């Protein structure tokens, strides 16, 4: 009965059990954190749910738990299920399987959050940008110091790390730009444009800008081929201009605009030739 209440997800897709476990993971590691009454109650609840699970005999659990880490290492997950039988023992008891599946999803979210470097970078920049305004107001010297601090940290990256980071930044921008293009026609994209581009302006003048430009050009080409040109692309490239030392994205958009103009003139020429031939026949 407890699992029937805690297990189902709400309209947002979050179950009460998942919410409790998430709150437990977010508690800081100090006396007021996981040692708090809330943390203690969550631990007692999960241990109670696991131990009173009625789906299978308790003797099966040790046999399933012993090789579990090896199975998770060697097996592969497809569509939420693991090949190689790691989830078969849990499926014998519906309650235990539901809890383990919920925990697996939370672990996956935590790892994805850790691996999403670009989003964490932008979130940190916005937080420090806000702290700069709170502490020092709108003074340009401190805004400049903020950018120099970020640039100094990026300069410490090795070449291979900078290459990997540049690709993640370009991919993150690609996702954000596609979302803004989907919301075209509203005032939202115009207001959001400067906000999500500002953290990347610190790349200007860094060696990182060359690799960032390379990957940005690749994603820009994919967007132009699949979705066509957009005024948004020009605005973004204009604002990120200092981050493109070779000006490849600017040249791509310029060449595309020139080709569109030539195509328009050619279509007009064809119409004029057609009118001329029809006039001669008349």
Image (tube, rainbow, N blue to C red):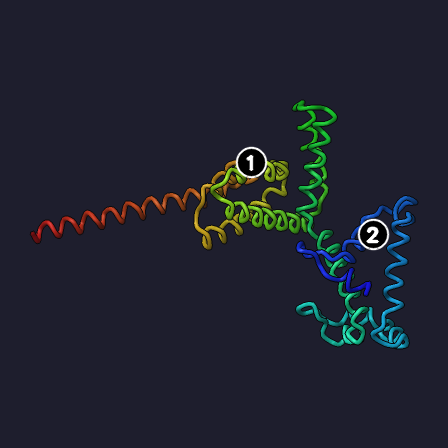
Q: Nearer the viewer, residue 85 or 260?
A: 85
For the N terminus, the image quarter is: bottom right
Q: Relative to 195, is 18 above or below? A: below
Mark 2 surroundings within 10 Å by alpha-carbon count, few (fewer than 14), some (14 through 19), many (20 or more):
some
Is 37 left or right of 144, judged from the image as shown?
right
Is 183 left or right of 204, judged from the image as shown?
left
Where is residue 39 drawn, in percent x and y?
A: 88, 51
Gap in angstroms between the C-alphas marked 1 and 2: 36 Å
Q: Is residue 211 visible?
A: no
Q: Which residue is mark 2?
A: 24
Under tag 2, what secondary structure?
helix
Mark 1 surroundings within 10 Å by alpha-carbon count, few (fewer than 14), some (14 through 19), many (20 or more):
few
Residue found at x 47% / y 40%: 234
Under tag 1, what secondary structure?
helix
Q: Relative to 49, is 212 above or below? A: above
Where is residue 64 drawn, in percent x and y?
A: 84, 74
Q: Relative to 232, is 17 above or below? A: below
Nearest-to-viewer mark from 1 and 2: 2
Residue found at x 70% / y 56%: 10
Residue found at x 91% / y 49%: 37
Where is residue 150 drawn, in percent x and y?
A: 70, 37
- Which of the 4 image quarters holds residue 146? top right
Residue found at x 45% / y 54%: 225
Q: Earlier in the sequence, mark 1 or mark 2?
A: 2
Where is residue 130 drawn, in percent x and y?
A: 70, 32
Are the residues tagged 1 and 2 within 8 Å (C-beta)? no
Q: Nearer the viewer, residue 233 or 39?
A: 39
The dot on residue 191 is 1
Is 238 left or right of 44, judged from the image as shown?
left
- Which of the 4 image quarters holds residue 48? bottom right
Q: Is residue 113 visible?
A: yes
Q: Nearer the viewer, residue 218 or 13?
A: 13
């Amino acid at each position: 009965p407890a699992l029937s209440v805690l297990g189902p997800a709400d309209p947002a897709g979050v179950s009460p059990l998942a919410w409790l476990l998430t709150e437990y993971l977010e508690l800081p590691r100090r006396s007021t954190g996981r040692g708090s009454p809330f943390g203690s109650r969550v631990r007692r609840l999960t241990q109670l749910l696991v131990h009173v699970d009625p789906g299978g005999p308790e003797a099966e659990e040790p046999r399933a738990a012993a090789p579990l880490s090896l199975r998770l290492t060697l097996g592969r997950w497809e569509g939420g299920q693991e090949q190689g039988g790691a989830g078969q023992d849990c499926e014998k008891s519906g309650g235990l399987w539901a809890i383990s599946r919920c925990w697996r999803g939370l672990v996956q979210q935590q790892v994805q959050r850790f691996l999403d470097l670009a989003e964490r970078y932008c979130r940190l920049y916005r937080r420090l940008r806000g702290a700069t305004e709170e502490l020092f107001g709108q003074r340009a010297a401190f805004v400049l110091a903020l950018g120099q601090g970020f640039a100094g940290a990026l300069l410490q990256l090795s070449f291979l790390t900078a290459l990997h980071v540049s690709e993640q930044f370009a991919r993150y921008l690609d996702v954000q730009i596609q979302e803004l293009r989907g919301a075209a026609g509203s005032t939202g994209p115009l207001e959001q444009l400067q906000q999500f581009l500002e953290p990347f302006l610190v790349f200007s003048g860094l060696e990182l800008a060359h690799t960032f430009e390379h990957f940005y050009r690749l994603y820009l080409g994919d967007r132009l081929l699949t979705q066509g040109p957009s005024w948004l692309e020009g605005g973004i490239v204009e604002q990120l201009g200092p981050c493109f030392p070779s000006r490849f994205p600017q040249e791509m958009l310029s060449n595309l605009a020139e080709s569109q103009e030539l195509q328009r003139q050619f279509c007009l020429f064809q119409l004029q030739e057609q009118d001329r031939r029809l006039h001669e026949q008349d």
